[in-house]
Amino acid sequence: MGTIQEHTSIVKQAAFSLGFDFCGVARAQMLDDDARRLEQWLSSGMQGSMQYMENHFDLRIDPQKLVPGAKSVITLLLNYFPSQTQHADAPRISKYAYGRDYHEVIKHKLKNFLEILREKIGKIHGRGFVDSAPVLERTWAQRSGLGWIGKNGNLLTKQNGSFFFIATMIADVELQYDDPFAKDYCGSCSRCIDACPTSAILPNKIVDGSKCISYFTIELKDMLIPSEMKGKFNDWMFGCDVCQDVCPWNRFSKATNEIELQPIHEVLNFSLDDWENLSEESFNKLFKNSPLKRSKYSGIKRNLKFLSARQSSQAVASKVPTDL
Ligand code: B12
Ligand code: SF4
Ligand code: SF4
């Protein structure tokens, strides 16, 4: 039986040994302020058709309900900033989706993480989560002292900006808690709000999920993207990075060392023609382990068609003589 300090240092060492870039710890407790914010967000319909966001409200705001006996929420960040960019003429893919599906990569790491903790600390009941569980991951990252929530809603670190995945391990082990990140380094900047192509970023760090390009291109399962969005996607075919690309703190992003997240050859090298001529069979084979499979072939085709409708209407407009 070690001390709380020793257990905490085992947790942090284990996190870094598995390749996580940052690790912070917070006491597992009910999130009152966030409950109010989440309720407001949901009652305004900002989840759009992401019905999973309406489920398990009670678990989402209380880690002790999600993992009975929970004492600590350990938050882990994994950098995904790529060292290379896509083919210049290609429809755009969000950087988080360049490599292998992060859910798989991180779940594997979380399993190893728990094994190390059990080996070094003893009997622990813990559960690892990434993205898909009812956990307010950004909130826990801020509460664990890892960074602040920017006006674009993302968790930002002073050291390396926001191109990080967030994962959590909720466990019944008592640890030494980090102070919540108290400062906010956005200041008077509003670049993300000004640059968002669909005006999805509202005041007070609220992002209207139902207006975000990421929602339309990945989460929206209806076949049609609303026509009022025509011309606003700036060539984004899967996800959108605009509010992160314009953020001054992302000048400090460094390329990830994680081998599993290295870009898939086709993501970097496919041209618009390659995407348009891709068969369903090839898509399923090439992107079997990629986040792109979430949209499925039909979603990618829908997104391409939506982008090309804009391009052809621009082409027609540019042929109209201006001196008439
Ligand atoms: C649903 C979802 C989406 C939806 C809705 C976005 C949204 N606004 O919530 C869509 C599909 C649009 C989306 C898009 C993206 N997402 Co997303 N998404 C999620 C998911 C599954 C849930 C988020 C959630 O709970 N939303 C509800 C709202 C109310 O919560 P919230 O935005 O997190 O805000 C809370 C806190 O920030 C806090 N808060 C807000 N203001 C303030 C102010 C103060 C002072 C304090 C203390 C707290 C606070 O209160 C809110 C309520 O608790 C999380 C994974 C998870 N389980 O958490 C990933 C997650 C947030 N997404 C992520 C990513 C990477 C993205 C994209 C960048 C992907 C892309 N490139 O296309 C975009 C970014 C869009 C944006 N600007 O937010 C990462 C964020 C990493 C990071 N560094 O922040 C996460 C954590 C996934 C992961 N595991 O890594 N996403
Ligand atoms: S990801 Fe794109 S569409 Fe969504 S909030 Fe950021 S800039 Fe706006
Ligand atoms: S672009 Fe500016 S306002 Fe937006 S998150 Fe970054 S620093 Fe904050």
Image (spheres, rainbow, N blue to C red):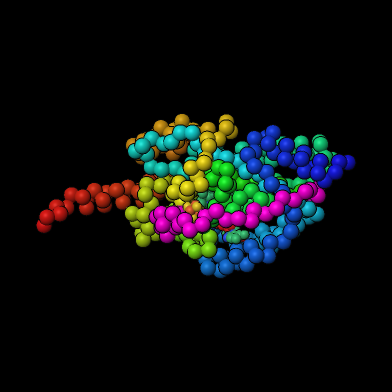
* x 47%, y 49%: residue: 247
Where residue 228 appears, x then y in whole percent? 36, 61
- From the image, give the main secondary structure of the stretch colored magenta: loop
Q: Is residue 184 visible?
A: yes
Where residue 158 appears, x then y in whole percent? 57, 46
Using residue 71 as the reference point, say whether residue 224 is left or right of it: left
Q: Quadrant of the N terminus?
A: top right
* x 37%, y 47%: residue: 235
Q: Nearer the viewer, residue 194 or 251?
A: 251
> Does the magenta run of residues contain 260?
no
* x 82%, y 46%: residue: 4
Range covered by the magenta-colored residues: 172-199
Say above or below: 307 vs 194.
above
Where residue 26 appears, x then y in whole percent? 72, 52
> Does the magenta run of residues contain 184?
yes
Q: Nearer the viewer, residue 142 or 170?
A: 142
